[in-house]
Amino acid sequence: MTTTQSEATVTTRIVDHFDRRKRDWVAEAMRRLHADATRSADTHVFQFPLPAQWGIDLYVKDESVHPSGSLKHRMARALYTHALCTGWIDPDTHVFEASSGSTAVSEAYFAKLLGLKFTAVVPKSTSTEKQELIKSFGGEVRHPGEDGDIEKEAARLAAEHPNGHFMDQFTYAERAYDYRDDHNLAATIFRQIAEERHPEPKWIVTGAGTGGTTGTIGRYLRYTRRQTRVCVVDPENSAFFPNWVRNEGRPKHRWPKPDQWITGKPSRIEGIGRPAVEPSFLPAVIDRMISVPDAASIAAMRVLLDALRHRAGPSTGTNLWGALRIIAEMLADGEQGSVVMLMCDQGERYLSSYYNDAWVRDTLRLDPAPYRTAIDGFLSTGRWHEPGAAAVPRPSQPAGG
C-alpha cells in the first residue's frame, strides 16, 4: 500500500486560548454571586390577616427586600451565573438587557457588583422611579425605536458593540434558574413555613413575565414530589392566558406553530404579562391560570398596604387577587389549608403611577374602587362577588375529578 506525503506528515495540532486573567476574574465573580445568594436567600414570609374561623392561612413571601428590591434579584443572579459559567461574560463585557424595569434594576445591581458596564432597554412607559434606580447602580437607560420592541433594540445594541452581550431574560430565564438548588425560591418557601399548621400549601400563586419563576416553582414541586399546585395570574390582554387555555396546558412542543399563537397587547401591570408567549414560559408545569382585571390588581395592591403596612407593586396586587379567589373556593368547599403568594417588588417604585389616583384614572383609565369593595366584602363576609356579576362560578372540573 502506498502512503501519500500528506498522510505521512499529519501531526497532532494544539491550540490554546486559556486566559488566566479572565479565568481568575470569573472565579472572583462567582464568589461574589455565591456570597450574595447566601446572604439573601431566605426573604421574609408574612401572614395576611384572614378570619380565624376560616381555617385558611395566606402567606406572603416578601421578595421586595432583596438588595435590588424585587423578585427579579434571584433571576438576575441566575442569569449572570449562567452567562459566566457558559463563557459569555468576561471582565470586558458590556451587558445589554430588555426589561420593563425590575429585571433591569437587578441586573444593573449585579453589573455593578461585578464591575461590568450595563445598558437597559425599557419601554417609555416604565416608571421614572425604576429608571432612576437603574441609573443609581451605574446602568444606562435606553428606549426602543418606534415599533416599541425592547428585545430587538437590546439585541441590536449588543451586536453592534465589540464586547456586547444580550442577556435575554425572556429566552434564558428558565434555563438559568436551578430548581434543584437549596437557594431557589420554592425551596425557601417550604423551609420557612415548615412549622406552620399547614406546612404544605394547597397553592402557590405567582404571575408570569418571562416565566422563569413559574418554571422554577413548578419543576421544584415535581422534583420534590409535592402535591402543591401552581396558579399563574395574568393581566388583561396578556398572551399567556389565552394560549394556555386554548392548548389545555400542554407543553409548547404540542402547540400549533408559533404563527398561529394568540397575540396579546402590552401589559398595563408592570413586570408581568406579555404581548407574546416567551420562550421561558413552561405551560405544562402550571395547574391553573386566572386572568385578572387590571383594576383589580391595583385595588388589591392597596388592600395589601392597609393589611400588612407594606407597600408593594401592582403585580403583587394581581397575585393577591388570585390568591383570594382561590381562598374563596376553599371556603365554599369547606376546605382548610394554606396558600402562598409572592410580594414581587417595592411599591416605592410606583408612587407617581399606580399609587397616584389621578395617574390611574387619566393614564390607565381604570377605576379600582368597585374591586376594592369586592375584596373588603369578601374579607368581612366570606362571599366572593365581582363587579358586574352576581358571583364568579368556580372552574369546571374534569370528568371524574
Image (cartoon, rainbow, N blue to C red):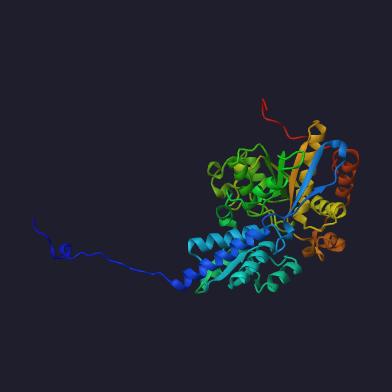
Nearer to me, 252 or 18: 18
Q: Residue at x 67, y 50 (%)?
A: 188
Where is residue 217 shown, x and y percent of the image? 64, 47
User: On the picture, is 201 further left or further right than 3?
Assistant: right
Q: Quadrant of the N terminus?
A: bottom left
Q: Residue at x 77, y 34 (%)?
A: 394
Q: Quadrant of residue 309?
A: bottom right
User: On the picture, is 381 further left or further right than 203?
Assistant: right
Q: Residue furthest front?
A: 195
Where is residue 132 shown, x and y percent of the image? 73, 71
Nearer to me, 169 or 17: 17
Q: Quadrant of residue 400?
A: top right
Q: Is residue 319 visible?
A: yes
Q: Residue at x 76, y 53 (%)?
A: 316
Q: Residue furthest left?
A: 1
Where is residue 317 shown, x and y percent of the image? 78, 52
Nearer to me, 97 or 256: 97
Q: Is residue 23 above or below residue 41?
A: below
Q: Number of numbered discs present?
A: 0
Q: Is residue 144 visible?
A: no
Q: Quadrant of the C terminus?
A: top right
Q: Residue at x 59, y 61 (%)?
A: 34
Q: Is residue 389 above or below residue 35?
A: above
Where is residue 84 shown, x and y percent of the image? 52, 63
